[in-house]
Amino acid sequence: MKQRVILLLIFNCLIISVMAQKTTERYLEDQYSWYVSLSLGNPTGNYHKILKEADNAGTKAGIVIGGLMNPYKRKKASTVFYGFEAGFQSNGRDKDFVSNALGEFYVANYSFWLNGVARYRPILWSSKINPYADAFFGPKIIRTAVVEQFGQDETEILKAVNKLVPNYGAGVGLGIKLSGQLKNSYLDIGLYYQQADATRIVKPNSVEINSSYLTSFKQVLTSTNQIVVKIGLTGFL
């Protein structure tokens, strides 16, 4: 709840500052919008505690690609665009695990998601500074893979554990209008809270590989919630 209140206050401040601008620029009557962002996730709550115990609580990098559509197409401008986004995040590798098998191994952790997105832009003209707010919901896959490394480009997955959970959240951001060949684009900086339902994930550093190449591990119940900073580009078509 605290995170959502903070996001709302930030967004209100952004709107007030931008509405004070005077502009004669064109209105955003575009039909489509696209965006691509670098995503920097920071675990919170119990999830952060679990990762910290495994010395893996740092920022997690990923990428998000999305496409949005004006529901009125080109008939009139709309403050709300709807669409979808796909995201990938690397949650790091386990630093300590037990292996009694011959060979080189590693344990990798990833997240993937596909969300429905609604983006609200209160400023309909192409202002130099353009605030926005997003709400999203969709499925998220949390994946842990035990991998044997044979060579520089050759690997084999010994065991993979996938957990499918709903994820949802909201965020606010600020777009800075670009010029030149990117005159229909914005440099976006956003702050988000991404929440997911609790599920049992592979406990970090609990994987064991025996001499027969069989794997075992412990599981821990947690919600993989995080605060996310996104930096990227948004364009209009």
Image: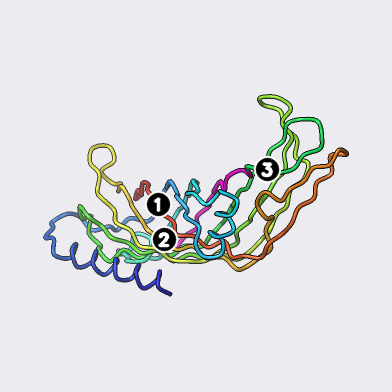
Name the residue tied to disc 3: 107
Residue at 76% x, 52% y: name it. 217
Camera-nearest residue between 116 and 220: 220
Q: Main secondary structure of the magenta part?
A: strand
Residue 171 found in image quarter: bottom left
Numbered mark located on residue 230 in the image: 1
Contact between marks 2 and 1 (CB within 8 A): the answer is: yes
Residue at 88% x, 39% y: name it. 212
Q: CA distance from mark 2 to mark 3?
A: 28 Å
Q: CA distance from mark 2 to mark 1?
A: 8 Å
Give, as a three-letter code, the residue at label 3: Val
Q: Position of residue 148 (x, y in %)?
A: 74, 35
Residue at 70% x, 45% y: name it. 145
Q: Is residue 72 left or right of residue 181?
A: right
Q: Position of residue 42 (x, y in %)?
A: 47, 55
Which segment is the magenta one?
82-94
Q: Nearer the viewer, mark 3 or mark 1?
A: 3
Q: Is residue 173 left or right of residue 45?
A: left
Numbered mark located on residue 192 in the image: 2
Q: Earlier in the sequence, mark 2 or mark 1?
A: 2
Q: Earlier in the sequence, mark 2 or mark 3?
A: 3
